[in-house]
Image (tube, grey):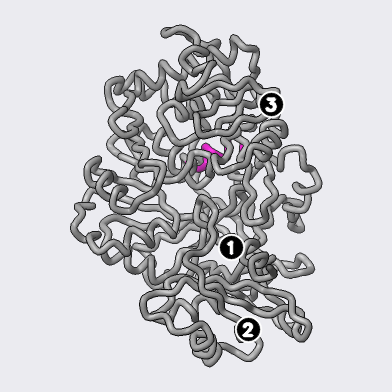
Amino acid sequence: MKQAAATAAPLPFRAIADLVREHAAARPFRRALVQGERSVTWAQLDAMMDRVAASLQRDGVKPRETIAICGANSLEYAAVFLGALRAGVAVAPLAIQSSAQQLADMAADCGARHFFVDGSVPAFATAARRIHMDGSSQPSLEGWLAPAGAKPRPVQVQPGWPFNIIYSSGTTGTPKGIVQPHLMRWQHVARAENYGYGPQSVTQIATSLCSNTTLVSFFPAIAKGGCVVFAPPKFDAATWLALAEQERVTHAMLVPVQYRRIMALPEFDGFDLSSFVMKFCTSAPFHAELKADILQRWPGGLVELYGMTEGGGTCMLEAHNFPDKLGTVGRPAEGHDIRVIDEDERELPAGEIGEVVGLSLSMMTAYHNQPAKTREAEWYDGAGRRFIRTGDVGRFDEDGFLTLMDRRKDMIISGGFNVYPSDLESVLRGHEGVADAAVVGVPSEEWGETPVAFVVPGEAAPPEEELRAWANTQLGKVQRISAIRYLPELPRSDIGKVLKRQLRAQFAA
């Protein structure tokens, strides 16, 4: 079934680095970036970007070539990223949690000419020139940069040029370089027109700049001339709230596990959060009960974004406008075409369950150097239009809102029946003694696969077998859980996704 929002006239494309120059001219002494006790104005950021761009040009790095960055969020990190864009150079922001071998492989795959790091990044052999943003080793960023006042040669950035290469392993463990063009990032800026970003906005960042989760909030804030505040790298709910209160934050992007920790704070209601205009959430399942709690107790709107780093279709749930749809991820964003297809790649009507595919201007160019993987991720409709396959299973309701069931690869086939782990997890979380839960399928001689649950127990948690018996009384015969294991916490990625492959391996071991 085709589900597409109406399309308004598109916002004419602009290069984000050019907008920074305009902000510097219009409000040179206003803060652009804040990190702890340090900050830079728009004029200072613009000058730093010029020095970075001029230095890359001096070193022979050409437009559409690539640099890599790895480190904690910092003023320097942001300036290097933005300065590279001014030179037309693509950026590969690499995850700081990566091993030395993973970093070496990703740096080689993207063909990085320079690799900007801080002291937390392990050493490894690379053809890229290594430059230390924090001055922890030589060459330092300051020593590498062209002199103050240096100006780069102007570059006319084109919409189809690569903006960044995001290495997203998702939950599969195999990194793939997702090439996102400038036009895709510009679509995120255009979408921000509706959510109050502007020169008076203050956006707090609490996830890494290597993540698409962060960048879909960071770049609209920069493009619209607002101030960006970097929270400390190690997330702490009370510290985050205190900083939001101090800086009078208006916008924030958080992942569900961060929202859960914030709302669980006994002192939450004592913070003054009246400055908030809009909060965003993405990257992992966002449970209806948590959304409802946020709507009740936290001022400002709440928007859930559902989509992939690869792009394609995005759904948006304006939870404050649709409190009766909190169990969904919303409707397709304006100009996005999202459909559900079956195993034979035929479109399905509303109410039918299938794989979600999407089409929009916000789409990756390809997986870098992986044409076969790129083809696997694509689906074409009868008119030959290219959609991105999400790998998620879902269905549209009669109002056009999408409910997600599970990742396609996480669906359990038990005795020939499809079992959706999210249904079982929802039942488990309904017990007062369950703080969190994840269900995976494991091999079974009798059924092919069988559901096993991993549970984070709360204060009132019963013995594992008692909880299993309780849950199975509420589940259908083919859904019944064969075992429950208590864990102190669920393994998660840096943006909060449960790593189910680790749970399967743990059970097998």
Which residue is labeled 3 in the image? 126
Depth check, front residue: 279 or 340: 279
Depth check, front residue: 264 or 380: 264
Of the residues under marks 3 and 1, which one precedes in the sequence? Answer: 1
Q: What element carries label 2?
A: loop
Of the residues under marks 2 and 1, which one precedes in the sequence? Answer: 1
Q: Quadrant of residue 449?
A: bottom right
Depth check, front residue: 52 or 461: 461
Q: Quadrant of the C terminus?
A: bottom right
* Residue 481: image location, x then y, percent: 60, 83
The dominant secondary structure in magenta is helix
Q: Which residue is drawn at 61% across and 66% down?
A: 503
Segment colored magenta: 180-188
303 sits left or right of 202 in the view: right
Of the residues under marks 2 and 3, which one precedes in the sequence? Answer: 3
Q: Residue at x 45, y 76 (%)?
A: 429
Residue 36 seen in the current view: yes
Depth check, front residue: 330 or 36: 36
Q: Is mark 1 on a helix, strand or loop?
A: strand
* Residue 478: image location, x then y, percent: 66, 87
118 sits left or right of 226 in the view: right
